[in-house]
Image (spheres, rainbow, N blue to C red):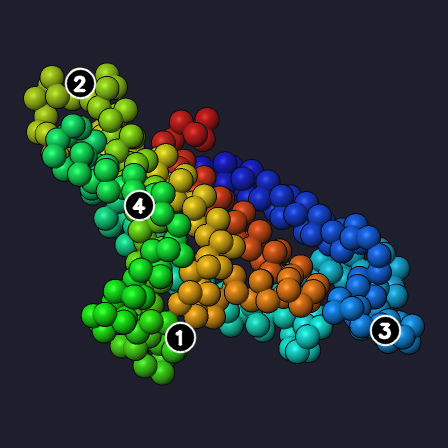
Amino acid sequence: MLRFALNKGLAALLMLWVVGTIIFSVLFIIPGDPAELLLTSDGASASQESIENLRKEMGLDKPLITQYLEFLAGAAHFDFGQSLIDHVPVGETIALRLPRTIELILAGLFLGLVTGIPSGTWAGLRPGGSFDRTISAANAVLISVPGFVIGTLFIYLFAQVLHWLPAGGYVSFTSDPLLHLKLLALPAITVGLHLFSIIFRMTRASVLEMRTHDWVRTAVAKGLRRKLVVRRHVVRNALGPIVTVVGLQMGILLGSTVLIEFIYNWPGLSGYLVTAVQQRDYPSVRAIILVVSALFILINFMVEMIYSLLDPRIRL
């Protein structure tokens, strides 16, 4: 197990270095001078002195190898320089916004797991039943509706009509725990419904597949209790694909919760990325993409470790 973890860890570090190198190179692949493009993005003209000053501020006046080494060293210490717009250290802004996005994703993941796995297991054990037909039909509708549509409907129903929950905003948990949870509820449910639809389908399909294997039929033939067969032989072996899909979805959600954060006015990392792209804030864009990529690689590493525990054959 240790050797397997070390090999996967080294592969993850290599992948992170490759991703960081690509992200660094993108700035120099863009046609034109990045400093000039930033100053003239709104159609205004810029003097050569202003362009040179901005190039110096961005470190573009240094040799390319020096810029590359400084970028890697800064990334290793979570130092990505200052934003070109508000001159606030990019690392501080990411450290402030990233936990909010992770909190939203984890809350949605919790809701998706506690509803998707039991319902998918039940539907897979009783295919064609009334529960299976009802949930599968509802899930087919749910998976086809975009998240921002569901979010808009939730705001209208729960905030404007029923007045059960606030429409959006953010308050830190330390300031007002109850209000924080109320503000988190709707966006978390929106994310959770998306994850539920995926987890339910994957769980149902995995359970249906596991029921056909020889070891399950053998366990039943030996007279083992149904609950024991389901828990030990069906659900346990069905968890592997589910873990993989959940890990992949978590990585995707890190950069794709833009609309949900926008609808609910949740100040997370995705909204910061959109703002940075719109304002051509290159240090911020580069840092956000690198951090999201690093988290995606970390999640994949964790998924492989969990999968190897569920199925020791992976380590062979």
The image shows residue 246 at horizontal and vertical percentages of 39, 44
Residue type at the position of mark 3: Ala
Q: Secondary structure at mark 4?
A: helix
Q: Secondary structure at mark 1?
A: loop
Q: Nearer the viewer, mark 1 or mark 3?
A: 3
The image shows residue 140 at horizontal and vertical percentages of 29, 39
Q: Nearer the viewer, mark 1 or mark 2?
A: 1
Mark 4 to mark 1 CA distance (whole Å): 27 Å
- In-image side of 16 versus 268 (left or right): right
Viewer-side residue, 130 vs 99:
130
The residue carrying mark 3 is: 46
Q: Secondary structure at mark 2?
A: helix
Residue type at the position of mark 4: Leu
- In-image side of 306 versus 134 (left or right): right
Q: Nearer the viewer, mark 2 or mark 4?
A: 4
Residue depicted at x 30% and y 62%: 154
Mark 2 to mark 4 CA distance (whole Å): 34 Å
Q: First in sequence: mark 1 or mark 2?
A: 1
The residue carrying mark 2 is: 217
The residue carrying mark 1 is: 170
The answer to whether residue 14 is visible is yes
Residue depicted at x 71% and y 48%: 22
Count residues near mark 4 (Cα–Cα under 10 Å), then give few for <14, some for 14-19, many for 20+. some
Mark 1 to mark 2 CA distance (whole Å): 52 Å
Q: First in sequence: mark 1 or mark 3?
A: 3
